[in-house]
């Protein structure tokens, strides 16, 4: 707001200078003809129009650069910005901005701007903290996907066990039915025929149950494949986020100071070892003395 107010004041001064220039340079006579007055007004209009067009264009371009910087910073951290163009012509909001500029709105005028905390601060909400929060969310998603995979694997094991039992029962029933059919070749009794029909009905029911079990197993296997693919994708995102967090941390002042301190300590250790070797005697007898 201060910059905009300064620009506006400069524009007003330029306009006043244009009028004053006409007064000082052209209004030298007591009377003027209509043609002379028209010529002075036309000249003044061209000057004012050119100055206003230049200043308005400059102000628009400054706003474009400002918004572009904000959008670039937002895109870097994958933030989504949404502008409501209807509010740009809201009279009530414009009046609040006008009152804010004049200092009439005390809550806005008394409010102090928040200062950004350094990246090395653990409690800051800077890029490092954003990356840590993103890593925590990815780890939670990985844990959830692993739990889902374990549950689906358990369901698959249960379905396969049920399928094996059904297949074993079907095989036993088929053997039993073959034996009954062989016996029915010699004895065509009504009781045996009834038993055969009962066994066939039981076999058909078990076959239907086996089919449903197989379909359920395939569905669970599909869910397991999808969850496994999603888990691999989330793990890849987590790895990239951890690499980005490590890169951001290596750019902080705390990391640079720590690295400098370690380098200094290593140099001191080398110097102490060199000095210690210079004081050690080479002759063991002299050392005993």
Image: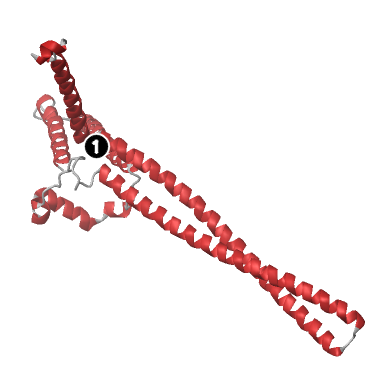
Give residue 131's quadrant in the image: top left
Image location of residue 54, percent across then percent down: 25, 32
Callout 1 secondary element: helix
Looking at the image, the residue that sits furthest to the bottom is 190
Q: Nearer the viewer, residue 197 or 174?
A: 174
Residue at image coords 52%, 60%: 153
Residue 86 seen by the camera = yes
Quadrant of the snapshot with the C terminus: top left
Give residue 199's quadrant in the image: bottom right
Q: Nearer the viewer, residue 148 or 285?
A: 285
Image location of residue 133, percent across then percent down: 30, 50
Q: Nearer the viewer, residue 182 or 127?
A: 182
Vertical relation: 80 (above or below) 209: above
Q: Which residue is mark 1?
A: 59
Quadrant of the snapshot with the N terminus: top left
Image location of residue 110, percent across then percent down: 8, 52
């Amino acid at each position: 707001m201060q910059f905009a107010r300064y620009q506006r004041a400069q524009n007003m001064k330029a306009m006043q200078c244009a009028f004053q220039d006409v007064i000082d340079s052209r209004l030298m006579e007591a009377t003027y003809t209509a043609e002379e007055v028209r010529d002075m007004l036309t000249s003044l209009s061209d000057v004012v129009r050119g100055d206003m067009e230049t200043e308005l264009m400059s102000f628009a371009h400054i706003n474009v650069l400002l918004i572009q910087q904000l959008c670039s910073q937002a895109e870097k951290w994958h933030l989504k910005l949404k502008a409501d163009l209807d509010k740009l012509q809201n009279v009530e909001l414009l009046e609040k901005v006008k009152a804010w500029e004049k200092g009439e709105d005390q809550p806005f005028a008394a409010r102090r701007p928040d200062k950004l905390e350094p990246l090395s601060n653990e409690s800051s909400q800077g890029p490092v903290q954003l990356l840590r929060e993103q890593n925590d969310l990815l780890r939670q998603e990985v844990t959830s996907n692993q739990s889902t995979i374990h549950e689906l694997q358990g369901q698959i094991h249960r379905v396969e066990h049920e399928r094996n039992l059904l297949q074993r029962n079907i095989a036993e029933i088929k053997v039993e039915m073959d034996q009954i059919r062989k016996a029915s070749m010699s004895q065509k009794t009504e009781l045996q025929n009834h038993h055969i029909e009962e066994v066939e009905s039981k076999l058909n029911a078990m076959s239907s149950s086996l089919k449903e079990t197989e379909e359920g197993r395939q569905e669970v296997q599909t869910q397991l494949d999808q969850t496994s693919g999603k888990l691999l994708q989330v793990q890849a995102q987590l790895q990239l986020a951890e690499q980005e967090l490590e890169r951001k941390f290596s750019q902080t002042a705390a990391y640079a100071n720590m690295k400098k301190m370690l380098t200094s300590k290593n140099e001191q250790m080398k110097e102490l070892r060199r000095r210690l070797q210079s004081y050690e005697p080479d002759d063991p007898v002299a050392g005993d003395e």
